[in-house]
Image (cartoon, grey):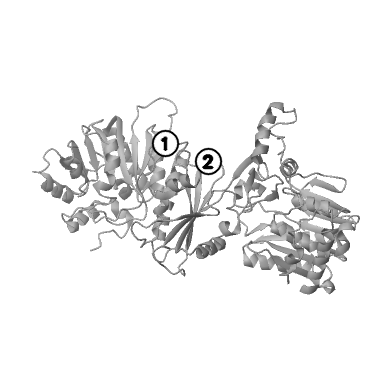
Amino acid sequence: MNLLPKSSKEFGSVDYWEKFFQQRGKKAFEWYGSYLDLCGVLHKYIKAKDKVLVVGCGNSELSEQLYDVGYQDIVNIDISEVVIKQMKERNASRRPQMSFLQMDMTKMEFPDASFQVVLDKGTLDAILTDEEEKTLEKVDKMLAEVGRVLQVGGRYLCISLAQAHILKKIVGYFSKEGWMVRVHQVTSSQNPSSEAEPQFSLPVFAFIMTKFRPVSGSALQILELCAQEQVKPVRLENTERLAEAVRERQRYAWLRNQLNRKTGPASVSLDLCDGSTGEPRYTLHVVDSPTVKLSRDNHFAIFIIPQGRETEWLFGMEEGRKQLAASAGFRRLITVALHRDQQYQGMDSIQAELSGKVMELAPPGLPAQQQVPFLSVGGDIGVRTIQHRDRSSLSGDYVIEDVQGDDRRYFRRLIFLSNRNVVQSEARLLTDTPHRAQKKRKKDKKRLQPADTPENPVPARQPIDKSFLCCEHHKAMIAGLALLKNPERLPEAPLALLVVGLGGGSLPLFIHDHFLKSHIDAVEIDPSMLEVATHWFGFTQSDRMKVHIADGLDYITNLAKGEQLHYDVIMFDVDSKDPTVGMSCPPPAFVDHAFLQNVKRILTPEGVFILNLVCRDSGLKDSVLAGLKKVFPLLYVRQIEGEVNEILFCQLQPEHKLATPELLEMAQALERTLRKPGNGFDSTYVLSDMLKTVKIV
């Protein structure tokens, strides 16, 4: 028998509820859980001596169970005459002090300040079905009546699914009235109990609104959230933050529900937040590998990503995590990324902290008492030291951090917090640990000179390995210089280069130090990045390398108007600040046809234009490649393995097209020259590898 209405609006109809309880009969109907699900929060906020009003009681057993454990001063009201008659008959002899009255909660007949507690289990949800004016007027009357019949210091306990429109209304209404608002998460999702129907994938919340005495002027808002695992409530600054915290809990419950379905997603991601601050502490990626042959011991595992390595392809990209899960041999693997600005005491501490929460994400069918392994690389949580943090007016908040790589070497990184899983710039440190330099800087603070201010920080003391390029796409861009004529002579030949996009300065600095007669113009739109490169990445200008703080679009457009300056090499390594575009590098304007014509005008006839392309939209990428071909007839593409980056090498003379063996020969010639004693070229580089998989478009 289907007792649910055809439309949610019927929940507000007397006729619907009369018919509902006639069809339902005497069997209790529990909307949002049984007494056992709710008793923890009810006992916390209802005293045995309190006079309690239950609104919209229906035929729930909640009042009866409260009565039986000592809460005997309870008045129940409902709009349905049928259910009130049923409940009177059911309780007349067993619970003589409890009363049941047919009454409309929007116009109650009780005197002012009659009760210490008003208890509402699902009634507000049933009435507030939409945000139409008529519905909101009815809800306002109900809430006004709740406020009228409660004493000062009394509590309105509302059990709800906290859908967005209900959360907005109830929190907004009572916070404006100057009441204290606390929200408890009562259940993770509807518990699978025979008493609780229907089943919900959303968690159940209890709103506790405490009536304060009215004060003149603006009332202080007190808004708190208390989740299941938290002992103390978290104070939130405004209604928007409270609503977001509730939504986070709902998303988590929905994800759990989806993961337990056979047709659920193969991978999901979520943040676990610090209970005291609300800040993200762990990011979890749940990856299922249905092709892994299941045995007793490989149902489930948790993999802790060492600090600073969450940006690597294996951990930071979905395809990488799938490969990790498959190679680990587990049907479900949860990777856990540790957030900067959070303190961790070690693997044992993290395991203890996460055990309860990650077990909620265990796959169906996990054997009872199954030992779930915690895995990591090398068995530790890695090292991450934040050296500096600041804000750029163009790029937003950023941090400079030192991390330990898998070879125990240390690397310095620039991270824009708007895209915290992408390394903007990276350099290898010559020292074996950043901590000694960090301690030294603390001592140096006592001897700061006037120029050493927060805006002009003390430079990091540990030296940068300027001979080493960390980024694979930078290595490919250097390899692209082999497309110039006579690559074996390049390190000693005059070379004019334009590099658009400075970042930490690693790319132009490498060219400057290894191509001894090169002259480099670097263009950077963000003046903060020049400071970052200088103070933290060992970048310096010279008579052969100048930085121009300008928009690369304007700089090139202005150059193209003249006939004086031509470059042998033009490199674009520019990120987009617009996350809505499917291309994060470069901004779309940098591949516009008219602008590419300007690039062509300032490039020598036999020069090479090298572009770092990061585009996840295949249609957009095809369009970019077609646009480049219209201006540069010769186009090579080099995909960076394990990354989204593709390096495009563009030239003007199609008759100079080279086959792969010829490309490799030229790259090897350049490599041999760079490897000459005293040149400082890192012996681990094999530039020819960067051109092995180049495709001609």
Kind of element beneath mark 2 = loop
Which residue is under mark 2?
Answer: 343
Q: 231 and 432: which one is in front? A: 432
Q: Residue 7 location in percent, x, y?
A: 32, 58
Q: Which residue is mark 1?
A: 223
Tell me if residue 270 comes above or below residue 232 in the rendering: below
| Image quarter of residue 197 | bottom left
Q: Choose top left, top right, bottom left or bottom right for residue 224.
A: top left
Of badges 1 and 2, the one in the foreground is 2
Relative horizontal placement of residue 107, taking residue 299 as reference (left or right): left
Which residue type carries mark 2? Gln
Looking at the image, is 327 positioned above or below residue 10?
below
First in sequence: mark 1 or mark 2? 1
User: Taking the image as drawn, is residue 556 in sight?
Assistant: no
Q: CA distance from mark 1 to mark 2?
A: 27 Å
Q: The C terminus appears in which quarter of the rendering?
A: bottom right
Q: Are marks 1 and 2 in contact (CB under 8 Å)?
A: no
Badge 2: few (under 14), some or many (20 or more) residues near its Cα, within 10 Å? few
The residue positioned 71% from the left and 54% from the top of the image is: 574
Q: As drawn, which residue projects farthest toward the left?
A: 93
Q: Is residue 36 visible?
A: yes
- What amino acid is found at the position of numbered circle 1 in the picture? Leu
x%, y% of residue 560?
85, 56
Percent from the top left, x then y, of residue 539?
77, 45
Q: Quadrant of the N terminus?
A: bottom left
Q: Nearer the viewer, residue 476 or 331?
A: 331
